[in-house]
């Protein structure tokens, strides 16, 4: 991945984290990595642990950022989330999966679409 793409993705994640902070979420981790994958942002919303996938795109593109969260990606996020919950002894606490789509235009403006509880997965995926 090019340095330009990495910087673009980081900008989107920074904007998403600022958005969550404005909403009162507590950021617990960013770019949480395990051998099975990575979760962009882990936050707390009240008593709920929230696993957030951030997708950034240039505004006016052909596909929406949210469309990039495939079934395979959802399964990967769920497996890493399970590892996080187990490691932090949070398996008995509520958790959910959100998607934040960040659309960035060429003038430095942006739009954030936050989709709380964007997807559910059956226990069998863990």
Image: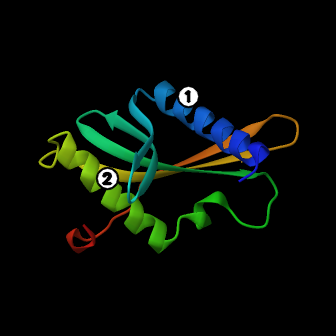
| Residue 94, image x, y percentages | 21, 47
Query: In the orientation shown, which residue stands out farthest toward the front?
Result: 35
Position of 91 relative to 72 (above/below): above
79 and 27: which is toward the camera: 79
| Residue 118, image x, y percentages | 43, 59
Q: Which residue is mark 2?
A: 81
Where's the C terminus, which quadrant? bottom left
Q: How many marks?
A: 2
- Badges 1 and 2: C-beta atoms under 8 Å apart? no
The residues tagged by marks 1 and 2 sit, at their Cα atoms, a distance apart of 22 Å
| Residue 125, image x, y percentages | 28, 71
Position of 66 relative to 94 (above/below): below
- Is 95 positioned to the left or the right of 28 in the image? left
Q: Which residue is mark 1?
A: 18
Question: Residue at 55% across / 28% down in the picture?
Answer: 18
- Is 50 positioned to the left or the right of 89 in the image? right
Place residue 1 in its image quadrant: bottom right
Binning the other alpha carbons within 10 Å of mark 2 as few (below 14), some (14 to 19) or many (20 upward) gives many
Place residue 107 in its image quadrant: top right
- Is 47 positioned to the left or the right of 62 in the image? left
Question: Residue at 15% across / 49% down in the picture?
Answer: 91
Query: In the rendered structure, which disc, 1 or 2, sits on the residue that comes first in sequence?
Result: 1
| Residue 77, image x, y percentages | 40, 58
């Amino acid at each position: 991945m090019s340095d330009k793409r990495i910087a673009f993705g980081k900008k989107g994640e920074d904007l998403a984290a600022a958005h969550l902070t404005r909403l009162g979420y507590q950021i617990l981790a960013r770019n949480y990595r395990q051998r099975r994958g990575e979760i962009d942002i882990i936050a707390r919303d009240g008593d709920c642990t929230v696993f957030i996938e951030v997708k950034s795109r240039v505004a006016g593109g052909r596909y929406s950022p949210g469309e990039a969260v495939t079934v395979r990606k959802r399964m990967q996020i769920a497996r890493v989330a399970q590892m996080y919950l187990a490691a932090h002894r949070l398996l008995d606490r509520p958790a959910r999966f959100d998607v934040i789509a960040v659309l960035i235009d060429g003038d430095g403006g942006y739009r954030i679409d936050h989709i709380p509880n964007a997807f559910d997965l059956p226990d069998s995926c863990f």
